[in-house]
Image: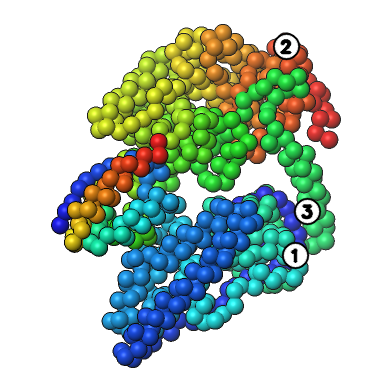
Amino acid sequence: MYTKQTVIKNATGLHARAAADFVGLAGKFQSKIVIRSLADGGEANAKSIIMVLSLGLSQGSAVEIFARGSDEVAAVDALVAWIEENVDG
Amino acid sequence: MELKGIPASPGIVAGEAYLYSPQALPVQKERFPAVEVPLQLEAYRQLRQKAKRQLEALRRRLERQGQPERAEIFAAHIDILFDTALNEEIGEMLEVQHFALPWTIHQVYEKYIHLLRQAKDGLIRERADDLRDVKNRLLRLLAQAPEESLRALCKPVVLVAEGLLPSDAAVLDGGKVLAIVTAGGGATSHSAIIARGYQIPALVGVAGVTERVASGQRVIVDGLTGWLLIDPAPQIEAAYQLRQQQYATSQARSRAYLEARPCTADGVPLTIYLNIAAATPQELEGAPYVDGVGLFRTEFLYMGRQELPTEEEQVGIYRRVLGCFGSRPVTLRTLDIGGDKPLAGFSPTQEANPFLGNRGIRFCFGEPEVLRTQLRAALRASVAGHLRILFPMVGRLEDIHRAKGFVEEAKRSLEAQGLPYASGIPVGVMIEVPAIAIMADVVAQTVDFAALGTNDLCQYLTAVDRENAVVTEYYQPYHPAVFRLLRHVTKEFVAAGKPLCLCGELGSDPLALGVLVGLGLRQLSMSLASVASTKRLLAGLTVAQAERLAAAVMQMSDAGQVKDFLREELRGFWE
C-alpha cells in the first residue's frame, strides 16, 4: 500500500471536467486507488467519476490518495503530480 | 381554478395544456438461470453501447445547433454510463445474484442516485438527475419503449409535468411549447433552465398540478406572479391578454438595450453592476450584460439552514461567482444580519431596537469565527477572479480599521498554510449609517471604494422603520435630505478619486435615475430585471439635463414636491 497527501489547487476544485480527467488518469493504473477527503473522511474509488464527484472537493481541500496493487507507487505519484500541476489559477 | 407555484421564467401565456407523464418503465424483480451469466453480461455491454450511440447522436445534434453547454450534458452522461464503480456493481450483481438486467440496473443506479442526493453542494445533488436520466434511457432501450412524445407535438401547448430531465429537454420541440409548468423543482431545476433558454414562461413547484390539469384544458400561465389559471372565464382571459401585450411591448423595447454599453445621450459612460442574492444560475444569467457585481449578498448561505456554511462550501460558491465575471469586479458583502434573525446555530436574541442593534459588521465582530471563516473563504476564492470585499453597517472609523484588521489576519492565516489569494483586493464599506455618510471625506481616505445602501440610509436618516405599518407614510425615499446627503457623499468620493456605487432600490428607480446621474454618480448596481430599462433611460438623458434635474431637486423642501416634479419631467418617456 502506498499513500500520499496533497491539496487541491485547481480553481474549480475536483468538479466537472477536472474530475473526468482525474478519473481517466486513475483508470490507466492496475491498482485499486482511493481518494480520501481529509476534511470529513469521505472516501471514493478514484476510478469512479460519480464517487469522486460525490466528495465535493473544492480548491484548498486536503486529500489523501492511496493505492494497493502492482503499480501503486506510480499510480499515487502520477495522481498527486496531476493534482499539483493542474492549477487553473 | 387557480394554483400557485414559483415563477421560474417570466412572461404570460394562455394555451392548451398537454399533460406529459412518461410511461412508467417496467422493472420486475426476477432472476435468470446461473448458466446465462455470460449472456446477460454481454447483453448489458451491448445495451450500454446502444445508449452511448444515442447519447453521442444527441450531443452532436446539439453541437450542430450551437448549444455546446447542453451538448456537454450528454458527454457527461456518457461518463456516467461507463463509470467504474457503477459498472463493477452491476457486473457483480449479475454474476452473483442473477437478477434480471432491468432490476439490476434499477437497483444500482438508485443506490448512486441516493448517494448524490445526500451531498451538501446543490450542484452535486443535481447530478442525481443526470443519473436518473441515464438509468431511464437504459430501461427504455431494454423495454424498447419509444423516445418520449415531446418530439412530436403537433400544436403549440403548455407543457405540464412532474418534472423534466435533460433528455426531455433535448427532444423538446421549442417551437411548440408555449410554457412549462412542473409540480416539482426549484428555480434551478432543469425545467426552469430550459424555459429560460427558450424564453417562455415557467412555473415550478406547483403542487398537485399533474392531478388537477388534463390535456386539452385551457390554462393561463403567469410567469411573473406564479399563478396558473385553469379554465379561466372569458373576462379573466381578456385581462391577461392585455397584461401579456403590455409586458411583451415593454420587454421588446427594453431588450434592445440589454446588450448596450450604458451611457448617457451625450456619450458619458456609466458602470452598471448586478445585485445578486443567491448566486443562482438564473441571477448569473445577467453576467454578460453588466460590468460586474456591485453587491453580492451572502446572507443566503447562513439562513434557513441547520448549520453554518463551512469554509469549503463558501469557497466553492464564491469561486463559481467570480468565475462568471472573469476580470470584472465581484463585490462580496460580508454577512449582514441582525441578531434577531434566525441564524444556524444561534438562538435569536430579543433586542428592543434591532435596527439600531447588533447587526451587520457589529454582529460579525461579536462572532469573530464566522467573519474569519467567511473572509478566509473569500480570499481563497479570490484567485478565480476579481474580488472586492464590502463591509456592512459600518458607523465609525474604528469599525473600518477593525474590519481591515480581520482581512489582514485572514491573509496571514492563509499564508501560514501556503494557500494563495489574489493581491491588491479592494476593501470597501456600505454607506448606510448617516454618521459615516457625513464623514464621507474621511471615509474616502480610508477605503478603496464604497457602496451606497440607500434603503437603509433612508431609514436611518429619516428615523423610519419601513416595515412598520404604522409609520409607512413617513418612509420617503424622495425626501430632499436623502438627495442632499447623496450629493455630499458623491462629491467627497469624486474629490478623493475613489469609486462610489449606489446599490439600493433608488438606483433602479426610473424617477430618480436622472437626479443620481446629475449629482455625479457614475456607478449603479441593480437586479437583472432593471438593467435593460436603466440603460434605455440613460440613453435618453444628457448629463446637462441630469444636472438640471439634480439642481432643481436640491432646491425643494419636501418629498411630494420632488416626486411631482420628477413625474412631470419623465412623463411620456415610457410610451
Kind of residue sitting beneath label 1: Pro
Q: Position of residue A88 (x, y in %)?
A: 40, 39
Please tell me which residue is depicted at 58% across the width and 12% down the height of the picture: B494
Earlier-in-chain disc, 1 versus 3: 1
Chain to which the residue tagged by mark 3 belongs = B
Vertical comparison of B543 with B130: above or below: above
| Quadrant of the rendered image containing residue A58 | top left
Amino acid type at mark 2: Ala
Q: Is residue B156 left or right of residue B29?
A: right
The residue at which mark 3 appears reads as B240
* Depth check, front residue: B425 or B202: B425
Q: Position of residue B125 (x, y in %)?
A: 43, 56
- Dot 3: element: helix
Disc 3: CA contacts within 10 A as few (<14), some (14-19) or many (>=20): some
Looking at the rendered structure, the kind of residue marked 3 is Tyr
Badge 3 vs badge 2, beta-carbon distance below 8 Å? no
Q: Which mark is residue B551?
A: 2
**Both on one chain, marks 3 and 2?**
yes
Front-most of residues B560 and B470: B560
Q: Residues within 10 Å of mark 1 (few under 14, many from 20)?
A: some
Badge 1 or badge 2: first in the primary sequence: 1
> Which residue is identified by label 1?
B156
Where does residue B397 sit, x and y in percent of width and height? 41, 14
Tell me: residue B249, above or below residue B512.
below
